[in-house]
Image (cartoon, rainbow, N blue to C red):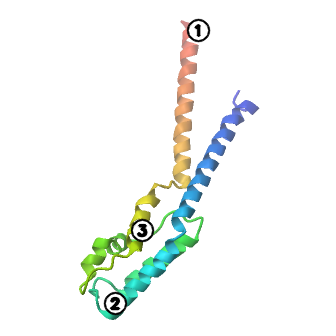
Amino acid sequence: MLFTAAADEPVTALQALLDQALAQRDAQLAELKAPCVEWADSLEALLDQAVEQGVVDKRKIQKRYYAPWFQALRQWALAPEQVKLELPPAAWARLSEDGLGEAWKKGDVPDHRHCAACHSCARRWPRYPTPRVMHCATLRTGCRCASSRKSAAVRRWASTIC
């Protein structure tokens, strides 16, 4: 019987599992995003000062490039519903300690704590599944369950015939 109250129970349980996973993901993302506005402000001020003082290679560090990166970081941090941080690969490369070291031409590269924190953030955020990914995984699981149930039913039916 496909459309009985008992048939609705797995769907309800599955929905509860999905809701729990999404709530957990949202809480972890909120924790990850919390300091990002401060990081963006701090790193942007550092780069502004470095450009102004001429201690960086101005071909590699330009406000017209890094200002949109920090704006995107702020917007992502302030939007609870936004999971994916849209930054170009060049942003991740340039904002790394190695990237800043390559662009710094005078004095020592500042050991800025937010550079390491941003890269830690970059390594962590792709692990958080989107609802679409979770939905696809749910469908695959449902298909496997239905397939195994059908196989079992066919085997039972075949055993009654033979």
The Cα atoms of the two marked residues, 3 and 1, are separated by 64 Å
Given residues 4 and 60, the one toward you in this image is: 60
Instruction: Mark yes or no: residue 86 visible.
Output: yes
Horizontal arrangement in the rendering, residue 33 relative to residue 107 (left or right): right
Q: Which kind of residue does numbered mark 2 sit on? A: Val
Mark 3: few/some/many CA within 10 Å (<14, 14-19, 20+): some
Q: In the rendering, which numbered label is found on residue 160?
A: 1
- Residue 55: quadrant of the picture: bottom left
Q: Which residue is mark 2?
A: 51
Tag 1: amino acid: Thr
- In space, the residues marked 2 and 1 are separated at their CA atoms by 82 Å
Above or below, 162 relative to 84: above
Question: At numbered mark 1, what does the secondary structure look like: helix, strand or loop?
Answer: helix
Residue at 55 percent of width and 68 percent of height: 34
Amino acid carrying mark 3 in the image = Ala
Residue at position x 59%, y 66% in the image: 80
**Residue 51: which quarter of the image?**
bottom left
Secondary structure beneath dot 3 equals helix
Sort mark 2 into few (<14), some (14-19) or many (20+) by Cα contacts within 10 Å. Answer: some
Instruction: Write down the residue under mark 3.
Output: 117
